[in-house]
Image: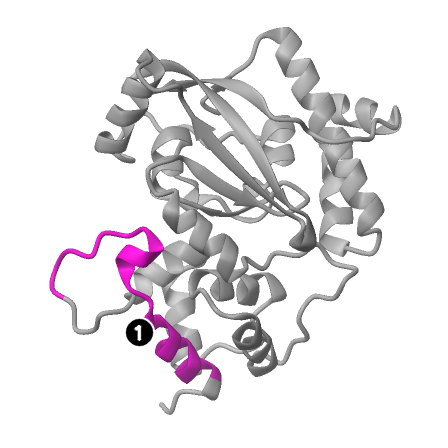
Amino acid sequence: MTATELGQALRRWRDRVAPDAAGLPAGGRRRAAGLRREELALLAGISVDYVTRLEQGRAANPSVQVVEALARALRLSADERTYLFGLAGLVPPGPDMIPGYITPSVQRLLDRLAGTPVAVTDAAMTLLVTNPLYAALMGDPSSLLGFERNGVWRNFLGGPTRVRHTPEDRRAFEVGMVAELRSTAARYPADRQLLHLIAELRAGSKRFAELWDAGVVGRLEASRKTIEHPQVGLLTLDCDQLRVEEHDLHILVYSAEPGTEAAEKLELISVIGTQSLVERRPGR
């Protein structure tokens, strides 16, 4: 079967991304220097079968979310991203939709922070990309799909995470998340995915509905987080949130003061990686 132009472009871009540049191990025998299909699928959060069907021209009409995820995983430039949307028969999200594009400058920053747990979310607090140390610390997010990748959804409707809050801290954290989400909703009132998320949260969480109806608005500020890792136990880290205002991205950076027990545990986690007998879903 002859591959479509979309499939050919995906294969070309996949071949040029080195695994280590994407935070993946480069070991084993490879027919090409680039990403394997399963690695692209992992980075984009879609199935290997779907990547295969796209490349072979057996799948059509990928969603905006899938195309955006592929653009991030393949580290496309702004022009290449626009071209990919065109090949998929789509128009890149406009200013009325929450941006999800990771710029090359942000990607370079992430690459330089390989020894620090880092995650990037969009303005609605949905995980876009994480590095391996974040996955090792907070739990591997690669299996999270749809709203499971959203920090507000996970904290109000999801299962347990590795983050441990005191009751007072938990209440303040919930207020901050709802306030941030309301501010985002005011900036993107026509974003259908965001409206769907808010409706699901209001229907499924009494606490969220109370806070939303109370009209809280503002920003979720940086904080210290206590995390219970299944192998090294409790560690408390600083969680700083850097904002890329032009593209409405949030960069979450976790760190420990050098020489502390938390720093030693974080170093141990970097050695352990994502291996764990008890996996819990990521917090934020």
**237 vs 86, nearest the viewer:** 237
- In the image, the segment drawn in magenta is 6-29
The answer to whether residue 121 is left or right of residue 51 is right
Callout 1 crowding tier (Cα within 10 Å): few <14, some 14–19, many ≥20:
some
**132 vs 167, nearest the viewer:** 132
**Could you tell me which residue is drawn at 57 percent across and 30 percent down?**
158
**Could you tell me which residue is drawn at 55 percent across and 13 percent down?**
165
Q: Residue furthest left?
A: 29
Q: Mark 1 belongs to which amino acid?
A: Asp
The N terminus lies in quadrant: bottom left
Q: Of helix, strand and loop, which mostly describes the magenta segment?
A: helix
The percent coordinates of residue 109 (x first, y second) are 45, 49
The answer to whether residue 274 is left or right of residue 122 is left
The percent coordinates of residue 280 (x first, y second) are 41, 28
Q: Residue furthest front?
A: 258
- Residue 66 appears in the picture as rendered: yes
Q: How many marks?
A: 1
- Residue 199 appears in the picture as rendered: no
Q: Which residue is mark 1?
A: 15
